[in-house]
Amino acid sequence: MAEFKLPDVGEGLTEAEIVTWKVKEGDTVVINQVLVEIETAKSLVELPSPFAGVVQRLMVPEGETIPVGTPIIAIGDSSTTEPVEPVEPVEPVEPTVTPQTESDPYLAMAEQAGAAGAADSSAEPHDSAGIDLSNPAASGSGEGESLVGRMKADRGATRRARKPAAAIQTQAAFESTGDTAPIDLDEQDESDGPAVPATAAAPVATGNVRVLAKPPVRRLAKDLGVDLSSVVGTGPNGAVTRDDVQAAHGDSGVEASGPPRRPVAQGEREWREPIKGVRKMMGQAMVRSAFSAPHVTEWVTIDATRTMEFVERLKARREFRDVRVSPLLVLARAVMLAMRRTPEINSWWDDAAQEVVHKSYVNLGIAAATPRGLVVPNVKDAEQLSLLELAGALNDLVEIARSGRTQPAEMSGGTFTITNVGVFGVDSGTPIINPGESAILAFGAIKKQPWVVNDEIVVRQVTTLALSFDHRHIDGEKGSRFLADVAGILEDPASALLY
Amino acid sequence: MATEANATQKVTLAKALNMGLRKAMEDDPKVLLMGEDVGKLGGVFRITDGLQKDFGEDRVIDSPLAESGIVGTAVGMALRGYKPVVEIQFDGFVYPAYDQIVCQVAKMCFRSQGKTPLPMVVRIPFGGGIGAVEHHSESPEAQFAHTPGLKVVACSNPVDGYWMIQQAIAHPDPVIFLEPKRQYHADKAELDETATPDPLFSSRLVRQGGDVTVLAYGPTVKTALKAAEAASNEGTSLEVIDLRTLSPLDMRPVFESVRKTGRVVVTHEAHVNLGMGAELASRITEECFYSLEAPVLRVGGFDTPYPPSRIEEDYLPDLDRVLDAVDRTLSF
């Protein structure tokens, strides 16, 4: 409950007569509603209410002359019709108080502000606590202005309605980014425009932007030894959350309160991991490919010793000093060359259109194992790149993939894929064709093995190439020729001069 | 409301400061008061009310309207062994004395290699909210906190006012003593003159909470506490710290709180740009980086001169703006 004290109406006057009450007890008043008419020595003045609420009590009868500062009306909270509290008997500011003078506008302001501010917290009348508020020795600043009704009523500890815009914006930011299905495969495959995840309401970072994560999450990642760049963020704008880090750590999550992980029952013999993100995408792609394109896989085992020697010579060259030169580079270049003779390898069976799509460009995909799972970014227009350019492109691509920052655009539009399973030490395999392509080449491990040269067994660097192709439009002859051409170049890089 | 001497009594900030000044003058005959209208009138806010009557015109001195002269004179007095306490009538009047404060008050002790400490207090009623005209509602604290050699403190309530003014006067170095004028005649608090006060240069946890830390000083402490109350109705628990000292800053309670909540809102009436909040945010980021769930947010005056009183309530940080910031920090 707030009390309104007779204010100094700005003329330095010290007292006023209550002439007419414009409200009565029980009335609901709003701010600035006229409460009372008072008469000072100079004029008749209407006082607006600084408070909103229900009039609890009129504390001064009409016709009485009272000093400035005397509480005249009590106004309570309109929402609660609380009984009138036993207010201390109005202490009509001791009659001995000498009146305020014209020098006191600021004192009055501070008092009025104090009264407005304190109104919510105490019902007791504010007197000046023994300080003599009057002083006739005033020098008079004359700066007083009418403050009546100006002080905003104190609402106490209540809050206005939230500004909807801000609230919605925040909410929207969460909603639009909270769901993280990262990439819609269909969209990715078929749009050759800049592929942006369907959910990306916020701009998706491109290039080498730091992973988004709050400082405590960074700390957690550091403590757990988790590389943040390898974690798929599920938070707003793709930020890595605490749960993401814990999931990446393989920690079953003391705090994994969020839905992603089901609590593991005691004596856990199996547990469930949600299929999402890169894993989900690859899974769908593999199923579609494996059960729509009839795969044929052929393989050839070759002596790659000359390729290894060639790699060593390349490494020694100045222009290659800044790139990583590997047998994969030679293979990639060999594939580009062999495709000139067998371009069907680079085409695509468009089942829906009942057409074979031939392509004059090669977007060479390189399957890369990353902590996020398998990703297949591709080198655009790889057939036009020189060996050195190709080396640089492969370098960038692998680096970005390993750091988990491969962008959707870099993974879409591939036309042929090399999967370098040799890095895992295996000889080869039967790779599954990437959707949208017609062939995939697996590159096995290069190992020293016994090899027959001129009817003698010698130690050579041997590897196995395996090619899976879509037998709907690539028959055995074309597939075999392509594989043999690639093998030929690896066996003798100089034969590349023939293409 | 006469009360027994020595018993606890409920007093306003104005009364508490008056009592504190009186106590300091009784305890130390070297303490002098000086300022515009502080004598006969007792100051425009009556903070020095009755002191000239009781201590005489030699110890409670009505000065000319010349702030530079007031502070400059006090420097001389302090050099000669007095402990002057000067009142700058309003925050916005301090600038004529700014040169004296920055070039003399702040530097004297350093200039003399510590041989001439300068025990003096510059009392400044600061902040807005009383509907005053230009120059009467400013918050210049950052200007002083930025100046090496000055101590800057701000009281927020009657009990602190009583103790802090005495501690500031007793302190051997110059202290800029900021008083929230809006609070002068507002809430009363129970003052026990026999209690042991907290050290002058210490901040204080005034409300415990777990979700967001709100830092405030002077007039915004009350704002923060009200915001905390409103937030608790919404299920958000705010921890409120009354900084009390702005230079030096007492960061330890702040760091402890931030390590607990991970979220901070700083509120002051002064402009946000390069204000105390900026320094607090910086220190918090340096010390508590890995605890921060959200950037430190500031709620303060806008980057305009203090507005006419008719719209000052829109300029001053209030409960709603503090809680909006709380919402924002929680949305990270």
Image: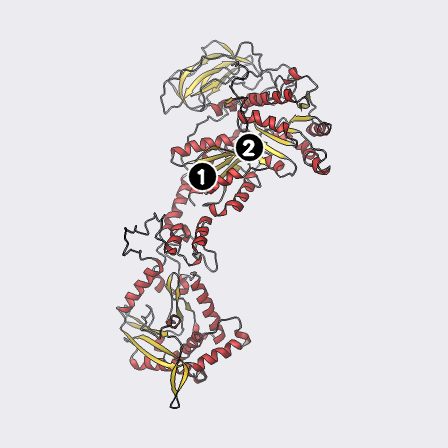
- Residue B254 is left or right of residue A436, and the answer is right
Residue A293: x percent and y percent? 28, 71
Q: Residue at x 45, y 48 (%)?
A: A216
Instruction: Name the secondary structure under disc 1.
Output: strand
Report the front residue among A330 and A84: A330
Q: CA distance from mark 2 to mark 1?
A: 19 Å
Q: Quadrant of residue B167?
A: top right
Report the front residue among A25 and A367: A367
Report the front residue among A425 and A70: A425
How crowded is the residue under tag 2: few (<14 C-alpha within 10 Å), some, or many (20+)?
many
Which residue was labeled with disc 1?
A: B212
Hey, which residue is sitting farthest front in the picture?
A267
Q: How is the image coloured?
A: secondary structure
Q: Chain of mark 1?
A: B
Type of amino acid at the residue the image marks with label 2: Arg
Type of amino acid at the residue the image marks with label 1: Val
- Residue B108 is left or right of residue A216, and the answer is right
- Residue B217 is left or right of residue A472, and the answer is right
Instruction: Name the secondary structure under disc 2.
Output: loop
The circle drawn on residue A486 is none
The circle drawn on residue B244 is 2
Q: Is residue A322 above or below residue B241?
A: below
